[in-house]
Structures are given as C-alpha cells and as structure tokens.
C-alpha cells in the first residue's frame, strides 16, 4: 500500500484581491490563465464584496483557482495579507482585480529571481490606462542614486500588479499595514528597504494598470500624513535630508491631487512648499510636473 503524497506546491502563487470587482475580475483572472508559465495557483481573495464578484469567480472553470472570502472588509492591505498567508507557492505575485498581465510577464520576470540575485523582489515597467480620459501612459520607474532615494522622491513601482517576490521576502518584511487605507504598497516598500537596498527591475512594460478617477485632495492629504508619521523617525535617524525629501515628495502628490480637482492656485502653493522643504529635489519635481503636462496626465 503506497503512502499518502501531499500535492506538490506550485512554483508561483498569483494573488488577486477583489472588492466589488464584477466588471473586471474575469479579465484579471484570464490574464493569469494566459501566462506562459503554467506551474502556478490563482489565489483570489474576495474582501466582502456586495456585488456579483463571488458568483463570477465561482463560474470560472479553473482547477488552479482557490477562492478565499473575508467575512468583513479588511481593505486591500488586509486582503493581500490573507492571500500571502494562504499562498503555497515558492514565489508570490500580485495582480489587482482591475488590472492585467501580458502573457509572458511571469516568464520574463522569473530569471531575475532564480539566477544569482542580489534581491528577493522583482518588478517591471507598466502601462497606465486612464479610464476618464482614455490616455495610455508607459511608466518606467527611474533610479536616482539608490532605490530608497528614488522611492522617497516619489517614484512608484505599482507593486500591486508588477511584484514578483520570494516567500522568504514576506516572512522577513512582514505583511501590509491594515491601518492604512491607501499607500499600503509604499509603506511596505519602505519597510522592505530597511532589509535590502536593491530590487530586480525589468524595464519592460508587462502589466496594465487601469485607473478610473482620482482621489480627493483631502483623502490624499490624510493618507500621506499617516504614511509620513510611520516613517519619519526612521528616516530622521538615517539622515534628516531623507525625511525632508520624503515629506516634500508627499506634498507634491497633494499638489497634483489639488490640480486634478480644479484647484490650480492651491496646487501651486503646495508645489512651492514641496520645493522649499527640499530645494535639491525642486528640479526633479519640476520635471515630473512637466512630464504630466506633456502627457496630459492631469485629467
């Protein structure tokens, strides 16, 4: 009589978090099913949706798919934590329910982590699709000195749909802060950079991020204040200039939100405040603002 053999763990756990995502969840899952790497599981965490999201997920004929349901809404950070805690793969990848991957996204990323790697996390460039304006913009995060400096200056990695990391990475850094309703990825990235000083980056846009609308300025202000409070002391201990850079980049985000909401005078005031806090970052902020204007990415 042969002994029981437990199912072999998949190579990758692709985690999708969903909340009232009935209009996009099938598209997201289909982009995972289309991956050229087939040794994966699809872990969908429904965060107490009130629409037909669960019914749509259950209708998908996919043996690699597991549906986990939160009885109460824990926010995107809490939903990701549930996904990571239940993932069985050696590697973990995220895909927001609004977004999609190119078919070779995982296959193109995997060699970055399976070779002689200096970091346990890889991300890619990505496309941003603006639902309101119909614009499509390619985002290629730029490295200024080191990645910590880049993140503090405002470069975003969109880890919610570009990340591929080892399981050990999450065991070391920990989960997402469920007290933050926004900017959880930025907070997690800064905690990651306390352990490692590098990422693996593939400068090819292999993920598609779909955005509809923009947050209100007061929402952005509250979010950036909370995020800064969490990291202010650590950054001051490393060097006061780092804290000033971070605070000024967060001010820049508030300025962008005000401009998008139809308050250009308020945006200008906060923009100049950001430059005054960190004069050395002024040219960078001006360059970012000019790129947004040229790309018409303020609407």
Image (cartoon, grey):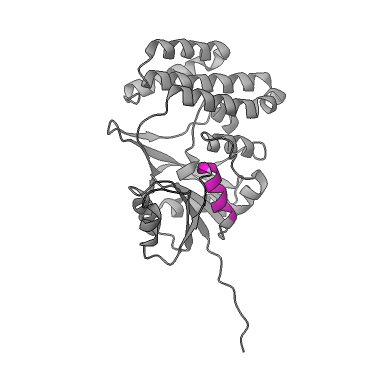
Q: How many discs mark residues in the rendered view?
A: 0
> In what quadrant of the picture does the C terminus appear?
top left
Magenta-drawn segment: 75-85
Residue drawn at x 67%, y 47% as measured from the top left: 172
Residue 284 x/y as whole percent: 48, 19
Residue drawn at x 47%, y 22% as measured from the top left: 218
Q: Nearer the viewer, residue 247 or 60?
A: 60
From the image, give the main secondary structure of the stretch colored magenta: helix
Residue drawn at x 47%, y 21% as measured from the top left: 254
Q: Nearer the viewer, residue 189 or 200?
A: 189
Residue 108 x/y as whole percent: 44, 51
Q: Nearer the viewer, residue 118 or 130?
A: 130
Outermost residue, left side: 134
**84 is within the stretch colored magenta:** yes
Residue 103 appears in view: no
Residue 258 x/y as whole percent: 41, 19
Residue 226 x/y as whole percent: 58, 27
129 sits left or right of 224 in the view: left
244 vs 150: above or below = above
Q: Nearer the viewer, residue 265 or 278?
A: 265
For residue 151, what is the image quadrant?
Answer: top right
> In what quadrant of the picture does the N terminus appear?
bottom right
For residue 128, what is the image quadrant?
Answer: top left
**112 is within the stretch colored magenta:** no
Residue 37 appears in view: yes
């Amino acid at each position: 009589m042969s002994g029981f053999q437990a199912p072999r763990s998949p190579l990758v756990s692709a985690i999708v978090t969903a909340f009232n995502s009935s209009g996009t969840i099938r598209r997201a899952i289909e982009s995972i099913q289309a991956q050229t790497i087939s040794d994966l599981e699809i872990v969908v965490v429904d965060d107490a949706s009130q629409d037909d999201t669960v019914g749509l997920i259950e209708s998908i004929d996919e043996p690699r798919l597991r549906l986990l349901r939160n009885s109460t809404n824990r926010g995107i950070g809490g939903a990701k934590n549930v996904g990571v805690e239940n993932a069985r793969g050696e590697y973990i990848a995220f895909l927001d329910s609004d977004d999609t991957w190119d078919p070779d996204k995982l296959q193109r990323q995997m060699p970055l982590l399976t070779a002689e790697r200096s970091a346990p996390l890889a991300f890619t460039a990505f496309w941003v699709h603006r639902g309101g304006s119909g614009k499509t913009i390619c985002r290629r995060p730029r490295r200024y000195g080191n990645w910590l400096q880049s993140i503090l200056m405002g470069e975003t990695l969109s880890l919610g749909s570009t990340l591929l990391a080892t399981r050990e990475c999450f065991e070391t850094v920990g989960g997402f802060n469920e007290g933050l309703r926004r900017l959880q990825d930025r907070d997690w990235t800064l905690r990651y950079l306390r352990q490692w000083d590098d990422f693996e980056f593939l400068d090819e846009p292999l993920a598609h991020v779909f955005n509809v609308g923009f947050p209100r300025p007061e929402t952005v202000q509250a979010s950036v204040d909370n995020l800064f409070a969490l990291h202010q002391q650590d950054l001051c201990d490393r060097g006061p200039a780092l804290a000033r850079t971070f605070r000024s980049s967060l001010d820049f985000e508030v300025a962008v939100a005000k401009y998008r909401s139809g308050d250009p005078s308020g945006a200008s005031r906060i923009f100049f405040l950001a430059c005054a806090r960190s004069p050395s970052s002024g040219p960078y902020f001006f360059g970012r603002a000019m790129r947004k204007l040229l790309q018409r990415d303020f609407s």
